[in-house]
Image (cartoon, rainbow, N blue to C red):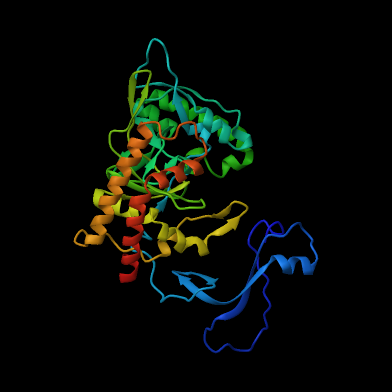
Amino acid sequence: MIPLFNVPCCVLWAQKLQAVSGQRPLPGEILAGELPRKNVSLPEAEAKLTVASVDFTLHHRGRRTFWAPWPATVKKGPSFYKKKFFQGATIVPRSFWFVQVKPSPLGFNPEAPPLVTDPRALKEAKKPYQDICFSGQVESQFLYATLLSTDLLPFGHLPFRLVVLPIEPHAGRYRLLDAAEARKQGFSHLARWLDKVKQEWARRRGAKAKGTTALEWLDYRKKLTSQSSQLNYYVTYITSGTIITASLVINNNISFLINGQEVHVSGFISDCVTYFYETNSVREAYYLVSLLNAPFIDRKIKPMQARGLWGPRHIHKKVLELPIPQFDGENPEHVRLAELGERCAAKVKDWLAQGGPGKIRSIARLRQKVRSHLQQELAEIDDLVKQIFEET
């Protein structure tokens, strides 16, 4: 009710019973309307409000439950992919790791480019880290690409962000290097960068720095070193937002162009503000991206999302509580979703290359424009996803 409540609210009357015989709908009412002002009298409010009598039923999504004013469906298990999507690495404090190449009219050595802390990282940093600005060279094999949630669009993404990460490929995953190991292997530039990280971490964290080092925090719960150094495709979606947004990242030959010079990086690493799934099957990847961007899927997770002043938020693994099936290359609906995903990705890439965003800076507006641009494809995707869910 506007302007009485800023977020949806409820009132519950209940009576404690000794036992309950079976589940049944709970009778309730939904009040909605716009009041002329706060604290109106009851007669004024009654004239402006609509009241709908409903039955609330208990719904199950994996281990999650919620009450909703529509009939509950048959309980179905979580997605095949629930244990295969992971949250990305805690690449924080961002002012330690997010960088830009410092251009020079005389050019630079692309094998060890001069770097400076990315100004965007300083702007978004928490208070203790807002005045940190590192500069120096780092060997290019320790440069990687990443994306934040505000870089993701449906079926596409804004330009990569450059990060320094002290890791090297090891047994299909990664191995963390500290300053001593970097020096031992002859990576003097990285070693000096890590020395500065260690000093600033100790100075700003104080006693807390003794419990966890900056490198341990960077690889918190192995979310960095457990990512693949070999697989080519990352299906990635935002951890939090009103509408779920998913994109495919091609982890192959990523480079940054600076004043006509290219800096090649060692690969893509997912950040903690996104969830990711790694695969070498491009058809499976596009299938998942199509499915995750389907309006049907977004509607399905809405009752599970917490709500704030700006609407639903917090997606995390809620979407994977839905019975999303494993990709089947023999299933025509799955194959068609993959084809549509590839088509949508190509359209978004062309739209970005042609300056589609213009001067728009709001990521919400950009995502809305992309969905409008893909309206026809999304309608077909939605129909296919509905069919798949009817079959599962």
Q: Residue at x 34, y 51 (%)?
A: 376
User: Image point 45% across, 39% down: which residue?
Assistant: 151
Up-down: is 340 above or below 215?
A: below
| Residue 30 in view (yes/no) | yes
Q: Is residue 52 above or below residue 132?
A: below
Is residue 168 among the parts visible in the rendering? no
Which residue ends up furthest to the front in the rendered image? 47
| Residue 164 rendering spot, x and y as whole percentages | 42, 32
Residue at figure coordinates x 46%, y 61% from the top left: 299
Residue at image position (46%, 27%) is 193
**215 or 359, which is in the foreground?**
359
Residue 45 coordinates in the image, percent (x, y): 74, 66
Left or right of 4 on screen, residue 317: left
Q: Quadrant of the N terminus?
A: bottom right
**Where, by quadrant of the figure, is residue 379 drawn?**
bottom left
For this orientation, the residue located farthest to the left is 330
Instruction: Where is residue 349? Give x, y as percent.
Output: 34, 37
209 or 105: which is nearer to us? 105
Quadrant of the rendered image containing residue 152: top left
